[in-house]
Image (cartoon, rainbow, N blue to C red):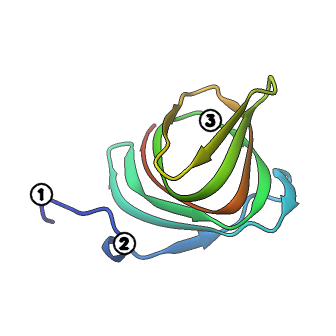
Amino acid sequence: MTLFERLTPAAATPEEERPAPEKLLAGDPVFTTWNVEEVEGLYCGIWQSTPGKWRIAYDEWEYCRILEGRSIITSEDGTEYPLSAGDSFILRPGFKGTWEVLETTRKDYVIRL
């Protein structure tokens, strides 16, 4: 293991999945995750989704930076957060709402459980 790691898709083997059927609201989004780091409850990598909409509920803390695409995160109180390349944000434990990918979206992330 090197002590320096670039966050690129080449740094990890991609994993594909879809939202659980009970969370899916629209479309057929496919998630691709390049999980570059996993150490003691800390995860770091790159995530991508094709268009669709699903419910989200966070038990973990997550920092994200949108690298490309367009999405809208909507909190359960109806507040909409439009996201596009260059936007950074934190989702804290307890956040609930929806994630809608309008254009295939790629982000880098750091998650702490």
Q: Residue at x 80, y 22 (%)?
A: 77
Q: How far is the residue under mark 3 from the one under mark 1? A: 29 Å
SS class of the residue under badge 1? Answer: loop
Q: How far is the residue under mark 2 from the one under mark 1? A: 15 Å
User: Which of the marked residues, 2 or 1, is nearer the chain's N terminus?
Assistant: 1
Residue 84 image position (x, y, % from top left): 57, 50
Mark 3 packing: few (<14 Cα in 10 Å), some, or many (20+)?
Answer: some
Against 90, residue 5 (above or below) is below
Query: In this rendering, would 90 be left or right of 80?
Result: left
Q: Disc 3 marks which residue? A: 58
Q: Residue furthest top?
A: 77
Against 1, residue 41 (above or below) is above
- Number of marks: 3
Mark 2 packing: few (<14 Cα in 10 Å), some, or many (20+)?
Answer: some
Tell me, yes or no, whether the two marked residues, 3 and 2, touch with CB atoms within 8 Å. Answer: no
User: Which of the marked residues, 3 or 1, is nearer the chain's N terminus?
Assistant: 1
Q: Which amino acid does the dot numbered 2 rest on?
A: Ala
Q: Residue at x 64, y 55 (%)?
A: 70
Residue 103 image position (x, y, % from top left): 68, 63
Tell me, yes or no, whether the two marked residues, 3 and 1, touch with CB atoms within 8 Å. Answer: no
Q: How far is the residue under mark 3 from the one under mark 2? A: 24 Å
- Indicate the quadrant where residue 19 lies: bottom right
SS class of the residue under badge 2? Answer: loop
Q: Which amino acid does the dot numbered 1 rest on?
A: Leu
Q: Disc 2 marks which residue? A: 12
Q: Residue at x 51, y 53 (%)?
A: 85
Which of the image's four quarters has the C terminus?
top left
SS class of the residue under badge 3? Answer: loop
Mark drawn on residue 3: 1
Q: Which amino acid does the dot numbered 3 rest on?
A: Tyr
